[in-house]
Image (cartoon, rainbow, N blue to C red):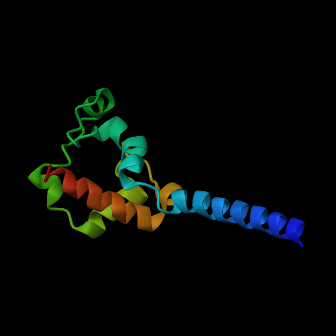
Amino acid sequence: MKRHSKVLLTILAGTVACVSLNAAPREQDTKQVYLDKCSLCHGEDGAGKTAKGKKLNMKDIRSADVQKLTPAEWTTIILKGKGTTMDSYEKELGADMAKKLADYMRDLSKK
């Protein structure tokens, strides 16, 4: 019985570890997603002063013009892309992460 208990505990511990590892992508850190997906063009601070951002004539997402967009407009742009310069991230990120990114980017103007 003791051997079976140890095996069961080992299996349960492995299951808990897998659940914990699987929870990380679901609740992926929004800032890290921004840095991975958005900062190449928009910059870490949202100013758009990166080499690619300058080449694409990127607007500063902290500017009043951009900040006046509604949360729904921000989310739609993230999901569907914009013009020929911004790709769609709908399949890659999904609506929940797009909403979190929109909130994160709006908050960049407050920093």
Q: Is residue 58 visible?
A: yes
Residue placed furthest toward the bottom: 1
> Which sits in the foreground, 89 or 30?
30
Residue at point 21%, 67% (across, down): 70
Percent of width and height locating residue 6 = 81, 64
The quarter of the picture where residue 52 lies is top left
Residue placed furthest toward the front: 2
Residue at point 28%, 39% (across, down): 44
Dividing the image into 4 quarters, which one contains the N terminus? bottom right
Q: Is residue 76 visible?
A: no
Residue at point 26%, 67% (across, down): 71
> Which sits in the foreground, 44 or 19?
19
Percent of width and height locating residue 39 = 34, 40
Rendered view: 4 above or below 18? below
Residue at point 37%, 42% (across, down): 35
Percent of width and height locating residue 45 = 22, 41
The quarter of the picture where residue 15 lies is bottom right
Percent of width and height locating residue 59 = 20, 43
Rendered view: 81 above or below 47? below
> Which sits in the foreground, 53 or 35?
35
The quarter of the picture where residue 74 lies is bottom left
